[in-house]
Structures are given as structure tokens and as C-alpha cells.
Amino acid sequence: MSSETTSSRPVKTTGLHVGDAVPGAKKHDPILIADSVKRTFGGLTAVDIEHVEIPRGAITALIGPNGAGKTTFFNLLTGFDKPDTGTWSFDGRSLAHVPAYRVARMGLIRTFQLTKSLALLSVMENMKLGAKNQVGENLFRSLIPAIWRKQDAEIEAKAMDLLTRFKLDAKKDDYAASMSGGQRKLLEMARALMSDPTLVMLDEPMAGVNPALKQSLLDHILDLKASGMTVLFVEHDMHMVRHIADWVIVMAEGKVVAEGDPYTVMEDPAVVDAYLGAHHDTDLGTDAEHVEALKELIDDEQ
């Protein structure tokens, strides 16, 4: 991908939803569906999702102000936390009571806002950990190198191909701790691809990344879609959202308050309300100043 990919408004995927683009809109081919998912912490309701569907084969952005419940929702969907109520499924299979490692084996892989690379392992060792169904993980089989050596060589070759693609091949023998924050983001994304996922969930992939690496991350996310994967990401960088997202879901106070294409969503009164904290008795639909303020807020985040 070249830098020109994100320099102008891209062609968006069409026909993602059924009917109007409203909160909880039905999708033609959803890969992830959540119904009545609620999570409370004491007296605080962090997530209260009535219905949401993630379209297959598209890049969906999950946005909202700090404290909206985005990361908590990610944790619930991927088995890192348990909801109080609700049902949710991935590719037609229920994820209720499925632990995080099994969710990953099913093809739903996530990254974290704070990278989870193992600092005292090399970059290559981190990559190899991401591969599924390694026969050498069995205690008894690991004692017989002839059983696992061929597969290990194949895993290492695949890891090297991905490191080259992410321009991290020169660092394959370096400790992960020696990498910059942006490089660790690239490593985490590359490691996620070792398991050949169907859906990749990225939690604030641009957080802490210097401008020099941002374009690289953008291009890699677009490559995921080009490779046939579905992408769901949490992001505060509205420049990124507008230029690569096919669909946007907006959360505020734990609920989905708006859905639609990026350019329509940015002017939705509910989104203005969520970001600016406007009073509920204000007629946001006719308040051009609030809309312009949101645009300025978005532009400032570029």
C-alpha cells in the first residue's frame, strides 16, 4: 500500500447494513453479534449493549469518548472479562463461557492498547508463540525433536515472512524490550497474524505511535482487509477513522448511540452530544455550532 491510499477519501464498502443506519442496525453478513450484553462494576454500568452486529469483510471503527466502555466491550467479546447478562456469537458460534485462549483458536484475535509482547524474549520467539496447534507444546512430544522439528521450521519461516512484511526482520534476534512503542505495536499485529485469524480486533493501534510509523500501521490494517480478514478497532484518531473505516459504531456511557459510514456519523447529533457532553434538552439537530465544534475536535486529533 502506498501513502496515497489514505490521502484522499477512499471508496467505502457498500451494502453492509439492512434498512436505516441506526444503533443496532442489522448487517447483511455479520461475523460478530452481541445481544443484551451488560457489565456492571458495583453501581457503575460500564457496558449496556442492546444489539450490535459487526459486518464481515469490512473495517469497523468503534469510537466514543473516554470511559464510553469500548475496551470493556472488547474484553467481554474476547473472553478476558465476563458480562453480567447477554449472548454473543462469532461466525455463528456462541462465545458464552469460552475462555480467551479458545476464542483465539476460533479465529478471533485481539491486540491491546498497552502492548503484550514478552520483553525478555526475542522478536522471533514472540512471533513463534502466536502460532496455533504446535505439537512441541505437548510435554511428551517435546522430548522427541523429530516429532516437532519440521513444524517448528515451518513456523519460523512463516514468522520470518511476516516480520519482513512488517519491516521488523532486522530485529528478529533483538529482545522485544529494546523496541520502540510503535515497533511493539507492529510486532503485536504481526504476531496476531501467526494464527491466521478471521477477525482481528485492535485496541487503539495508534496510541503511543510516532508519526513516522502511523502510515505503516494504516497500510497494514488496510492489508488485513485486502487479505480477506474482518477488522474491528477502537481508535481516538479521527483522521484514521475517516480514511480507513467502512463502518463506524459510536459508544457513549456504555451504549451504542450511533452507527453509519464515517462521514455521516461525524455529523450525527448523538455523536456531537457524546463527544461534547451537550445537555439533553439542547436541540442538537439545529445547533450548527455544536457540529462545527465536533469537526474542529476531530481535526485537532489529526
Image (tube, rainbow, N blue to C red):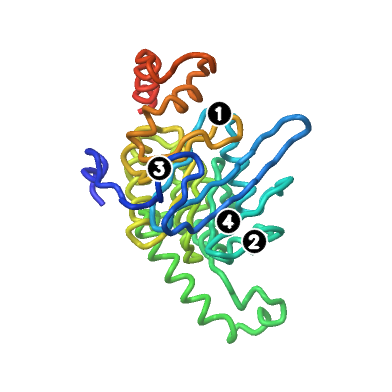
Residue mark closest to the camera, 2 vs 4 = 2
Report the residue at 49% width, 59% height from top.
31
| Cα–Cα gap, marks 1 and 3 | 27 Å
Do residues under tags 1 and 2 come within 8 Å of each other at their CB atoms? no
Q: As shown in the figure, which amino acid type bears the numbered disc 1?
A: Asn
Up-down: is 124 above or below 113?
below
Label 1, secondary structure: give it: loop
> Mark 2 = which residue?
101
> Mark 4 = which residue?
121
Q: As shown in the figure, which amino acid type bears the numbered disc 2?
A: Tyr
Q: Viewer-proximal residue, 49 or 238? A: 49
| Cα–Cα gap, marks 1 and 2 | 28 Å
Q: Which mark is residue 20?
A: 3
Q: Earlier in the sequence, mark 2 or mark 3?
A: 3
Q: Residue furthest bottom?
A: 146
Q: Which mark is residue 125?
A: none
Image x and y of residue 200, in percent: 48, 55
Residue mark closest to the camera, 1 vs 2 = 1
Q: As shown in the figure, which amino acid type bears the numbered disc 4?
A: Leu
